[in-house]
Image: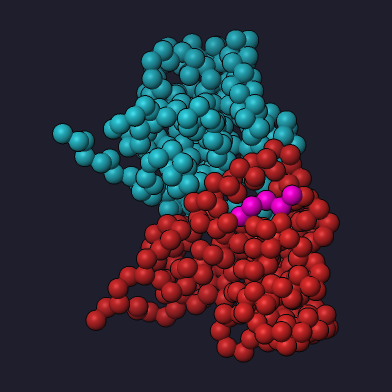
Chain colours: A red, B cyan
Amino acid sequence: MSGSRKVVELFYDVVSPYSWLAFEVLCRYRNVWNIDLKLKPAFLGAVMHDSGNRPPGMIPNKFLYMTSDLKHVSEYFGVPVRQPSNVFETMFEKGSLKAMRFVTAVAEKEKEGDVKLERVSRELWNRIWSNDQDITLPASFAEAGLKAGLTASEVDELLTLATSQPIKDKLKSVTSEAIKYKCFGFPTIVCHVDGKPEIFFGSDRFEVMAHIIGEKWMGPNPVKPMAKM
Amino acid sequence: MSGSRKVVELFYDVVSPYSWLAFEVLCRYRNVWNIDLKLKPAFLGAVMHDSGNRPPGMIPNKFLYMTSDLKHVSEYFGVPVRQPSNVFETMFEKGSLKAMRFVTAVAEKEKEGDVKLERVSRELWNRIWSNDQDITLPASFAEAGLKAGLTASEVDELLTLATSQPIKDKLKSVTSEAIKYKCFGFPTIVCHVDGKPEIFFGSDRFEVMAHIIGEKWMGPNPVKPMAKM
């Protein structure tokens, strides 16, 4: 590896299936590309509201396409996305505010690295976007946390922390960072290249992104190059 | 090459810059992949109206992103896209109805293959999406046609044909084909795989599309494999 590691920020919300795809791909590439991946859990609802954007599900043909596109892309990427039985209720009525506060609490408690953050986020995606399970109740967060390898006492502490004002403020503040980048949906990926942020929306620009950060796209399942002796 | 050629239909409108990207990539791959590429000039305005979709330019942050994304992607794809000076006026007020009737007339007159259709489409994209030139006036179509290698008498005939009822009807009919595929924007790419249409929207699914039609994505500039002896 040569040169300084480029910072790549991934703004995501577990309510967004395309965020899951981007999350898995970037987690795979974090040890392949010379990047410093920063996971940035944020609240999609606020971004949509702020930008005036409408979810793709509001246009019937876009919704139909999303269903087929998610099937294509998740198979190709090797991420087990399966649409929940009631997408509208799941995404727009129930939403993800409490879930993202829980994720924010995990991020806040984790002093070094983001192993727990990565695992808990994945478990929540598994619940909503693979197993058609709830992500609004404390018991759901507890189950996701335990599956992610946290202890029962860690989970208890996180459930309390997740409802605290500092965590609510932290989620707002990370969401505001995304909004400052003029984002209009998630995933939003911000690559810092030569002091300039380059913004990529969605999970379909990895090849172009790689080119811009001076790396090579090797498809959704990269192989780490042999270390130079 | 083995097996039967898969039919790939590209529904496009020269008002759409992402359609240009898809058009150039598919024209490059038509001799590399075992496909039968069908160019389908259609009218984006009717598709947007029918689907209730709104152009990305209507959401300010999406418009900002489009500007930066088009720069990234067109550089990477090697297509000289440059935003016209007044995008809104160009895309939404002036529009492309007459231009697409002219393109339809070219398609209709061309008995074998689609060399002229390909060239004229490219010249119109060059006008609107590279050189900031008009695509609403007969003189503009004439110039594009001449640049594409048509003779003056061919151009004259096409200008007359483009205003005829059969050509208006033909454009409507191709647009209706796209609408039947539940499309909500262009480019819409329909791959016929084992008797089933697989739909891809946009110019960012080539890698997944290749996988589904049993071909290999080699980036925006493919190299034709050596013929087997």
Q: Residue at x 75, y 37 (%)?
A: B52
Q: Position of residue B160 (x, y in %)?
A: 55, 11
Which quadrant holds residue B211? top left
Q: Residue at x 71, y 52 (%)?
A: A84
Query: Quick check: A72 left or right of B184?
Result: left
Q: Decide which of B224, A195 is in the foreground and name it.
A: B224
Whether A16 is drawn above or below A155: the answer is above
Question: Do we see residue B105 in this rendering?
Answer: yes
Query: Quick check: A1 left or right of A5?
Result: left
Magenta stretch: includes residue A83:
yes
Q: Decide which of B129, A117 is in the foreground and name it.
A: A117
Query: Quick check: B38 left or right of B87?
Result: left
- Residue range highlighted in magenta: A81-85
Q: Decide which of A157, B92 is in the foreground and name it.
A: A157
Where does the C terminus of chain B fall, quadrant-wise? top left
Q: Position of residue B12 (x, y in %)?
A: 55, 32
Question: Do we see residue A51 in this rendering?
Answer: no
Where does the N terminus of chain B fall, quadrant-wise? top left
Q: Position of residue B176 (x, y in %)?
A: 64, 23
